[in-house]
Image: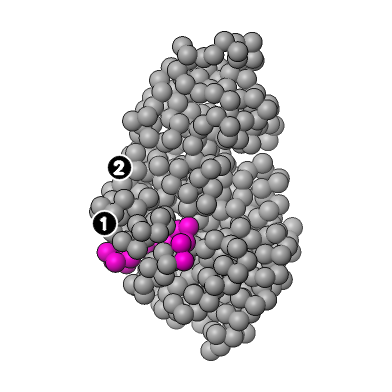
Amino acid sequence: MTTLAHDADGIWHNAHLLPDGDPADAIRDGALVVREGRLAWLGPAADLPADFAALPRHDANGAWITPGLVDCHTHLVYGGQRADEFAMRLAGATYEEIARAGGGIVSTVRATRAATEDQLFTQAAARLQPLLAEGVTAIEIKSGYGLDPDTERRQLRVARRLGEAFGVSVHTTFLGAHALPPEYAGRADDYIDLVCNTMLPALADEGLVDAVDAFCESVGFSLAQTERVFNAAAQRGLRVKLHAEQLSNLGGAALAARHRALSADHLEHLDEAGVAAMADSGTVAVLLPGAYYFLRDTNLPPIDLLRRYNVPMAISTDHNPGTSPVTSLLLMLNMACTLFRLTVPEALAGVTRHAARALGAAHRHGLLAPGRVADFALWTIDSPAELAYWFGRNPLAAVVRQGRVHRR
């Protein structure tokens, strides 16, 4: 993508519109109007109000225009990478052998703690740019590779800086309860005390936290420990989300639902009781096909149950160094269809309106509507299905982020 940004104000014509990501609601031969960086009108070009006729015009050249894509679950800010660990695993090394060799999450924690804020920014920017080049206009970025107050703060500060530097909407999530740091080995409850009583209040007071997450799993934190984190978040007026049912069914999704969580994510081992609880609470199911693929998992999320209970399904990259080093949300669209058997409309909703809901930002992202900030993508495709069909090809022609145009 070029770094030069231009004003998006004016009439965007010679376009086909997909206002809510659903091909059934497509507007062929449409137009939209941007004024002062916000959408002022959209609809069939033949119905363009005369009040707008004198505005500058932008020729979309027959492109499809969708809402800007939303990547609602990422761990984008961290130090280093774990490619050598990947190679060891392929060569037959066990988790324990990798850990003894200094690998695993501890290696990322070590690299992240050793990195300066500027170093973390530079590394994260290189991961963010491919996502922006595929039409992402809003992204969630979690902490969780610091596991101490200073490094968690650095991660969240970098996330905020990325939003300012690239003109992208960044939603920050405090994931202090991601793993047990080495210095707290055997003292998980003491570490949760640190998360709840020290880190979360301080970071929230600094305005660095939009939501709070935890990893509820046998290799992570228990239901009781997770609930302590959720209660601490509630005291600060912060919404919660949860890594749940990825490796086993501990009932994390039901716990998240009881706390009206924005989302429960992964869900490969989710049962019907958990699905029903999510349906009652309005909690979004965030599907992460990159991690499923990278870990060579064989236990599919219960897609049919989620459909039956009308639980909204979002799709995200889960970008992280250990289990999903993915920098393509379009690839995740394809994998959600091919691996999880989502339909094209489900997949498109999963990276637009449902992903926005998983951020608690359905009022800001994932939909083209008058009054909203101009965040949209232009695609050189003949059919919206192509966004889920191609992989290895990027059909983005241009993207408008926060009312500014960025062309490829």
Residue on which the image places disc 2: 343
The number of numbered badges drawn on the structure is: 2
- Please state the horizontal and vertical placement of residue 85, each as a whole percent of the image: 49, 69
* Residue type at numbered disc 1: Leu
What label does residue 216 carry, if any?
none
- Please state the horizontal and vertical placement of residue 369, each as a whole percent of the image: 51, 31
> Quick one: which residue is furthest to the bottom in this view?
186
- Picture layout, residue 366 above or below residue 357: above
Residue 134 visible in the current orientation: no
Dot 1 falls on a residue whose secondary structure is helix
Residue density around tag 2, few if under 14, some if 14–19, many if 20 or more, within 10 Å: some
- Picture layout, residue 40 above or below residue 85: above
Q: Magenta stretch: give its range.
A: 259-274
In this view, the residue in front, 216 or 112, is 216
Is 208 left, or right, of 86 in this rendering? right
Residue on which the image places disc 1: 305
Task: Please say whether residue 408 is one of the residues in the magenta stretch.
Answer: no
Q: In the picture, which quadrant includes the N terminus?
A: top right
In this view, the residue in front, 71 or 408, is 71
Residue at 62% over, 30% down: 38
* Residue type at numbered disc 2: Thr
Q: Earlier in the sequence, mark 2 or mark 1?
A: 1
Task: Please say whether residue 262 is one of the residues in the magenta stretch.
Answer: yes
Residue at 50% over, 79% down: 225
- Please state the horizontal and vertical placement of residue 398, each as a whole percent of the image: 56, 30
- Please state the horizontal and vertical placement of residue 94, each as a whole percent of the image: 41, 77
